Amino acid sequence: MSLKNYDAGCSTVGCHQQLSAMRWVHAPISTNDCSACHELIKDSTDNLTDNSTGNPSEHLFKPVVTDGSTCKACHSFDQSPISSHEPFDLGTCHDCHDPHGGDRKSFINTESTQALCAKCHDPVAMEFEHHPVTSGDCLTCHQPHQSNHPNLLVQNQETLCYGCHQDMDHAGVLSGSPMTQGQTNVHEPMYTQGCTACHSTHGSDIAGMLLKDQRSMCLGCHEQVIEDLPQAMSIHGAFQGELACTQCHVPHASEYDGLLTVDSSALCYTCHDQPIETQSGRTLQSMKELVEKSPVVHEPVALGQCTACHASHFSSHQSLLLENYPNSDYEQYAPGIYASCTECHDKALVESQFTTLTGFRDGDQNLHYVHTNQKKGRSCGMCHQPHAGSLPKLMREQFPFGPGGWELQIGFVQSKTGGTCMSACHEKRSYNNSDTP
Ligand code: HEC
Ligand code: HEC
Ligand code: HEC
Ligand code: HEC
Ligand code: HEC
Ligand code: HEC
Ligand code: HEC
Ligand code: HEC
Ligand code: HEC
Ligand code: HEC
Ligand code: HEC
Ligand code: HEC
Ligand code: HEC
């Protein structure tokens, strides 16, 4: 075959015919404008070097300049993007594109976008992988060339995720108007920093695709929560462990205050609805069952206000109490030692020697004062249940006496004008609290 005249075009039958037979043909190819990119090497007489022989295998071309200038002669791009892809900057367009055309739109030179990106970015295997990443949809989040956002992102990072996770846009980051129904308490980083404050975008070895283990992540922003932990006397079992925080809090948005998983009145019963074995081997009775089966329930308990007396995280008092409360059965009264009770109940109930403020009096002699204001003062818990019980006035039926686990019966019986305690701490005694003794 001989070729003396190039005017017929290079992609004619028998020559570079396959270039115009691809599914997608690059415009200059279809117009036979090979010289837009290929420059023939000509001799001194400006004749084509192979004109003498007419042998096409001898026609020589200068190497195509691959700094992008060839392509940029026809294609223009943003001059000052925020981020730009390295191979695009280097102008090695043919790393990704077949310059002539191809079977894929945009003449991508691999069978898929996923394979294209994987040519240079090794897929990293992770235990918890993000669906669009594993399915190779890199371009739903990234631009291939340049972008007006960092990391070649198609949108700013704060809103990118809401595009697919619209159901989480309670604050209205994308839509512009917060959802008015349902989970209206939105965790602040959801609208100030976006999802990537907590999540890794491609995947992670931590469940939920988190950046760090959950506890360190929450505490990373909420250091003040554990500021007083070193002084703690009791630490909640629920507050310990890596997944502690989300046992009570949701990370995104909640319809309840404090980002709680359920209403605060139901929160504690999500675990204390059954007996709990403590780390020290003790069994805590089911608080829910106790309350449900008891005829007398302390009002704050009945209202589900556990946190009126207890801390949820930890406390510098025993039993997670917010205030002082003696740990022993006997304690000489001093102001403040029963703050757990006197937060709500008038302290005159114990402090005044003579008063009609309390029902526990004989005449106007305050029997609370008598019992608590002595060296071996009885603590409130010796006579009362803090939560619920079967007797009026939350009186206990018995209390543990001595180390043997023996239970001492109090035998409290209420009457119209007072009450009686049977022989236990002392011989059977009655008191009269009616105004007409
Ligand atoms: C848009 C620019 C451009 C146009 C137009 C163009 N080419 Fe190319 N061509 C290139 C580049 C770039 C390479 C080098 C590719 C590489 O190194 O991977 C190349 C390589 C070639 C090669 C050698 C490698 C191969 O793919 O077989 C041939 C043959 C070729 N071109 C023929 C043509 C013909 C014929 C035309 C016109 C019908 C044409 N080209 C038009 C850019 C172009
Ligand atoms: C002579 C001008 C010219 C040169 C040089 C040129 N192109 Fe093109 N290119 C076009 C035209 C015209 C189109 C079709 C119109 C369009 O879609 O922008 C096109 C289309 C494309 C497309 C497909 C666009 C789509 O929508 O699918 C790609 C990819 C492309 N060019 C890449 C390149 C690369 C890579 C180079 C350099 C190797 C290059 N072009 C050089 C003129 C040129
Ligand atoms: C890292 C791979 C990669 C490199 C390098 C690259 N591209 Fe692309 N390019 C793509 C992909 C992928 C698409 C398809 C985008 C899509 O479908 O949304 C594309 C699309 C295009 C298009 C058509 C759509 C558009 O954005 O106009 C043109 C034209 C184009 N590239 C030209 C170039 C030129 C010129 C260069 C070199 C300066 C270049 N590309 C370098 C991957 C690349
Ligand atoms: C020819 C090699 C090559 C291909 C193909 C390639 N990349 Fe890259 N990419 C690089 C290099 C080199 C860098 C810069 C070094 C780095 O960050 O790893 C980079 C950086 C990036 C960055 C970080 C940009 C920044 O501003 O920090 C993203 C995102 C990226 N590539 C996405 C992609 C996607 C998506 C694809 C497939 C469409 C792809 N790359 C295909 C070579 C490539
Ligand atoms: C759901 C959106 C999303 C998808 C899908 C996605 N990325 Fe990314 N990618 C991001 C975001 C956001 C960043 C910014 C850094 C970060 O937060 O991890 C990023 C960063 C990058 C970086 C630069 C930082 C790094 O990790 O080296 C590269 C490279 C990259 N992506 C490549 C890819 C490739 C390749 C794919 C497809 C297999 C892909 N991405 C799919 C969202 C995505
Ligand atoms: C293209 C759509 C799309 C985009 C954009 C997207 N996601 Fe996803 N994401 C999904 C799909 C699909 C799933 C898997 C289905 C599911 O679990 O709901 C998922 C699941 C997740 C999961 C749960 C993973 C697990 O192990 O349970 C997290 C976390 C997540 N995405 C975070 C993000 C973050 C952060 C961004 C923004 C950088 C983002 N997503 C952007 C589609 C998307
Ligand atoms: C303050 C940290 C934080 C932020 C911000 C955050 N997440 Fe999460 N996300 C978590 C934690 C922690 C989990 C694990 C919850 C669990 O295991 O109970 C999680 C779980 C998920 C899950 C899987 C379980 C589920 O609830 O469906 C998806 C999907 C998810 N997040 C998407 C997102 C998206 C999308 C955004 C941004 C709109 C986002 N997250 C913002 C901390 C966060
Ligand atoms: C990126 C930082 C960040 C991370 C991570 C984070 N938070 Fe927050 N969180 C905030 C900010 C900011 C506020 C609002 C200011 C405040 O109340 O301290 C807030 C508020 C809260 C509130 C109070 C809400 C209210 O309405 O009173 C709770 C509870 C909370 N976060 C729990 C968590 C838990 C649980 C985690 C881990 C799953 C976590 N946070 C992770 C930044 C963070
Ligand atoms: C047993 C349930 C429970 C657990 C476990 C728990 N919290 Fe709380 N947390 C609460 C309750 C109840 C509140 C009070 C809510 C309110 O203000 O209405 C609260 C309040 C908060 C507050 C806002 C008030 C403050 O103290 O600053 C933050 C922040 C917080 N928790 C973070 C955490 C973190 C971090 C963890 C994990 C280390 C955690 N919580 C574990 C129940 C819990
Ligand atoms: C996620 C489960 C869970 C939730 C929710 C929960 N707890 Fe607990 N709680 C425990 C466990 C487990 C223990 C036993 C800890 C131990 O080993 O000492 C415990 C122990 C206690 C103790 C005894 C502590 C001591 O030092 O004697 C009190 C008091 C307590 N919880 C109160 C509450 C209150 C109040 C709430 C609601 C704000 C609540 N709990 C919610 C799991 C939970
Ligand atoms: C009026 C204050 C008050 C309220 C309200 C209250 N508690 Fe208590 N709780 C106490 C006191 C005081 C103790 C310590 C009892 C003791 O030392 O004998 C205690 C002890 C406990 C214990 C440990 C029991 C043990 O055997 O060590 C648990 C568990 C407990 N409370 C759970 C709850 C739950 C759940 C609620 C809400 C339904 C609640 N408390 C409401 C005062 C209260
Ligand atoms: C959060 C507030 C609050 C705290 C703290 C509190 N109480 Fe009460 N208590 C009440 C309310 C409200 C009532 C019902 C109205 C009343 O009798 O004053 C009540 C009633 C009582 C009764 C009478 C029950 C009946 O059936 O009539 C006793 C006994 C009692 N409390 C003991 C205690 C003891 C002991 C403590 C400390 C462990 C304590 N309270 C802590 C709010 C509280
Ligand atoms: C020796 C047993 C005993 C001790 C100790 C005791 N109480 Fe009582 N308390 C009673 C009796 C009995 C009643 C019932 C009085 C009546 O008949 O109404 C009562 C009634 C109450 C009432 C109901 C209102 C009233 O005053 O009648 C409250 C509140 C109360 N006690 C709180 C406390 C507090 C707080 C402490 C600890 C500082 C405490 N009690 C210690 C036996 C005791």
Image (cartoon, rainbow, N blue to C red):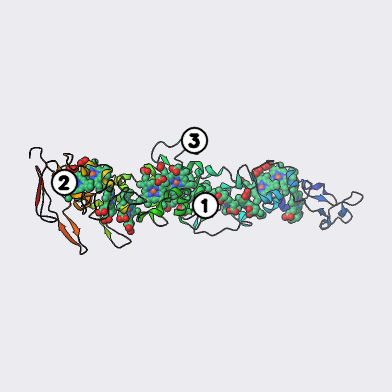
* Mark 2 or 1, nearer chain start: 1
The residue at label 1 has a CB less than 8 Å from ligand 5? yes
The image position of residue 108, as x and y in percent, is: 65, 51
The residue at label 2 has a CB less than 8 Å from ligand 13? yes
How many marks overall? Answer: 3
Q: Pointer 2: what residue?
A: 367
The image position of residue 162, as x and y in percent, is: 50, 43
- Type of residue at label 2? Leu
* Residue at left offset 48%, top offset 51%: 220
Q: Quadrant of the N terminus?
A: bottom right
Q: How busy is the neighbourhood of tag 1: few (under 14 within 10 Å), some, or many (20 plus)? A: some
- Cα gap from disc 3 to disc 1, whole angstroms: 25 Å
- Type of residue at label 3? Gly
The image position of residue 233, as x and y in percent, is: 35, 55
* Mark 3 or 2, nearer chain start: 3
Secondary structure under the numbered disc 2 in the rendered image: helix
Q: Pointer 3: what residue?
A: 176
In contact (CB < 8 Å): disc 2 and disc 1:
no
| Residue in front for this viewpoint, 154 or 435 | 435
- Type of residue at label 1? Ser
Q: Nearer the viewer, mark 2 or mark 1?
A: 2
* Mark 3 or 1, nearer chain start: 3
The answer to whether residue 127 is left or right of residue 13 is left
Q: Pointer 1: what residue?
A: 200
- Cα gap from disc 2 to disc 1, whole angstroms: 64 Å
The answer to whether residue 379 is left or right of residue 150 is left
Secondary structure under the numbered disc 1 in the rendered image: loop
